[in-house]
Every structure is written in C-alpha cells, then in structure tokens.
Amino acid sequence: MTRGNQRDLARQKNQKKQADLTKGKRTDNLTVEQRKARDAELMREKQKKKEEAAAAGTSK
C-alpha cells in the first residue's frame, strides 16, 4: 500500500460528514400539526394511566 492511511482517513472523514448531514432530520414524514396531534394524544394517554395508578394507589 503506497498510499498509507490516506484512504482510511478519507473514508472516516466522509462518514463523519454524512452523519452530520443526516443529524436532526426526521424520518416519520409528518407535518408539524400531525406531530403535535400525535404527541398530544400520547401525553393524554400517559396522564390517564398516571391518574389511574394514583387512584388505585390511594384506594388501598
């Protein structure tokens, strides 16, 4: 190998660059409104479960 580690360094640099380009991008293809609605529904379900657990815990 007459090129030394030049190929490996270039590969590592490119991998880091590609990772930085895709960082923060969402893959769920939802609009902001759809995402907010989904998250709100999840939070409502979570809150309901928490309230039920609290009610069950206090009625011992």
Image (cartoon, rainbow, N blue to C red):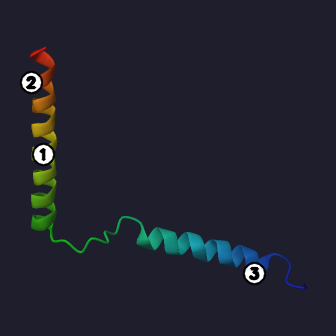
The residue furthest top is 60
Q: Distance between the residues labelled 1 and 3?
A: 52 Å
Position of the C terminus, as image quadrant, is top left
Image-quadrant location for residue 15: bottom right
Taking depth in this image into account, of 9 and 47 the one nearest to the observer is 47
Taking depth in this image into account, of 19 and 36 the one nearest to the observer is 36
The residue furthest front is 60
Q: Is mark 3 on a helix, strand or loop?
A: helix
Q: Mark 3 or mark 2, which is nearer to you?
A: 2
Taking depth in this image into account, of 16 and 34 the one nearest to the observer is 34
Residue 44: image x %, image y %?
9, 45
Residue 55's label in the rendered image is 2
Image-quadrant location for residue 35: bottom left
- Identify residue type, mark 2: Ala
Residue beneath disc 3:
7
Q: In this view, does 56 lie to the left or right of 9?
A: left
Neighbourhood count class around disc 1 (C-alpha, 10 Å): few under 14, some 14–19, many 20 upward: few
Q: What element carries label 2?
A: helix
Residue beneath disc 1:
45
For marks 3 and 2, the one nearer the N-term is 3
- Identify residue type, mark 1: Glu
Position of the N terminus, as image quadrant, is bottom right
The structure residue drawn at horizontal position 19% and vertical position 71%, both measured from the top left corner, is: 30
Residue 18: image x %, image y %?
51, 75
The structure residue drawn at horizontal position 41% and vertical position 66%, both measured from the top left corner, is: 23
For marks 1 and 3, the one nearer the N-term is 3
Q: Is residue 26 left or right of residue 47?
A: right
